[in-house]
Amino acid sequence: MSEFKDIETGIENGIGTVSIARGDANNTVRPQTLREICEALDMLMADEAVKTIVLRGDGRHFSAGADFGFLEELTSTPAAQIKSTIYTHFQGAAKRLYHCPKPTVALVQGAAVTVGCELTLACDFRIAAEDAMFQESWINLGIMPPLGGTFLLPRIVGLARAKEMCLRARRVKAAEALDIGLVSEVVANDALDERGRELATELAAMAPLGYAAIKEALHRGLETGMEAEWTANVANQAILIDSQDFGEGLDAVKARRKPEFKGR
């Protein structure tokens, strides 16, 4: 893999990991960080050996948000350049996670603020450590969440709670995050990585074509009507039934064994 400065990557047992590695700066992110995340995600998505992708942060925090040096630079940056930076790197990382056909899991300890929070929202699953805290505090800077939070949060936690988070910069700690559905589970801090590997391993065994089709359909359903979903899903189901994975899944169910899906 490429040499990175702000992140670390690895592949083990079909699980690809992207770790924000700026622990000495509370894993705050800058354009370089997001550019490297984009590159890493592209490589992991293209690698057939990778079945699941885990996003995590080294040190005390998942990510305390944007680097203040970068934010200060923005005050003297032309609007067109700001749009290009956000779209290319920051929004690019969120888009890759959201559209990734492979399972994505965010492991969150400590703070997941602004950019950090939005990257977790783009993942399929979020596991929080007991000390985790989510915050969309863009309003405190007089700006807005640009990476998908205004779309995803109301659909995950409901409009009223999304307004609390986005319009009041309200912090949501781990226990509450679990209660409102922002995360799927909360574990002890020292169990976070192990639980992440367990879930990633479970997801890696899923039928890749079926997983990608269902994920795409769920996302499309957020924006389309029922008639469009029926039409699209019948066509996609026909393709899946014609796959080798369907035959393997059927054989495995009849034989009462675990299937071995190949993504074909």
Image (spheres, rainbow, N blue to C red):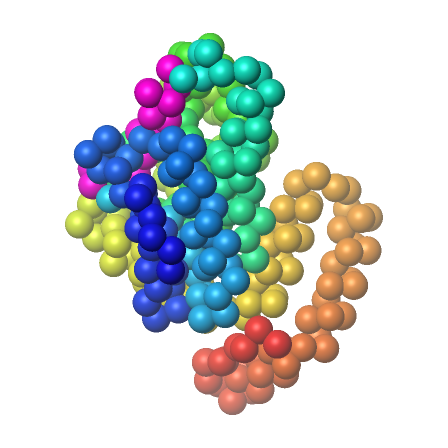
* Quarter of the figure with residue 129: top left
Point out the image quarter for the C terminus: bottom right
Q: Residue at x 20, y 45 (%)?
A: 189
Q: Position of residue 81 (x, y in %)?
A: 55, 23
Q: Is residue 210 left or right of residue 105?
A: right
Q: Which residues are magenta?
A: 59-72
Please identify the dominant SS of the magenta region: loop
In the rendered image, residue 13 lying in the magenta stretch gets the answer: no
The answer to whether residue 236 shows anywhere in this view is yes
As rendered, which of 259 and 112 lies closer to the eye?
112
Q: Residue at x 63, y 46 (%)?
A: 219
Q: Position of residue 251 (x, y in %)?
A: 58, 86
Counting every numbered tag in the picture gives 0
As rendered, which of 231 and 148 lies closer to the eye?
148
Picture layout, residue 205 above or below residue 164: below
Point out the image quarter for the N terminus: bottom left
Q: Position of residue 115 (x, y in %)?
A: 42, 31
Q: Residue at x 47, y 46 (%)?
A: 38
The answer to whether residue 148 shows anywhere in this view is no
Q: Is residue 199 left or right of residue 150?
A: left
Q: Is residue 107 left or right of residue 246?
A: left
Q: Position of residue 41 (x, y in %)?
A: 46, 52
In the rendered image, residue 64 lying in the magenta stretch gets the answer: yes
* Quarter of the figure with residue 130: top left
Picture layout, residue 69 above or below residue 102: above
Q: Is residue 182 left or right of residue 264?
A: left
| Farthest-out residue, bottom | 255
Q: Residue at x 54, y 40 (%)?
A: 92
As rendered, which of 167 and 116 lies closer to the eye?
116
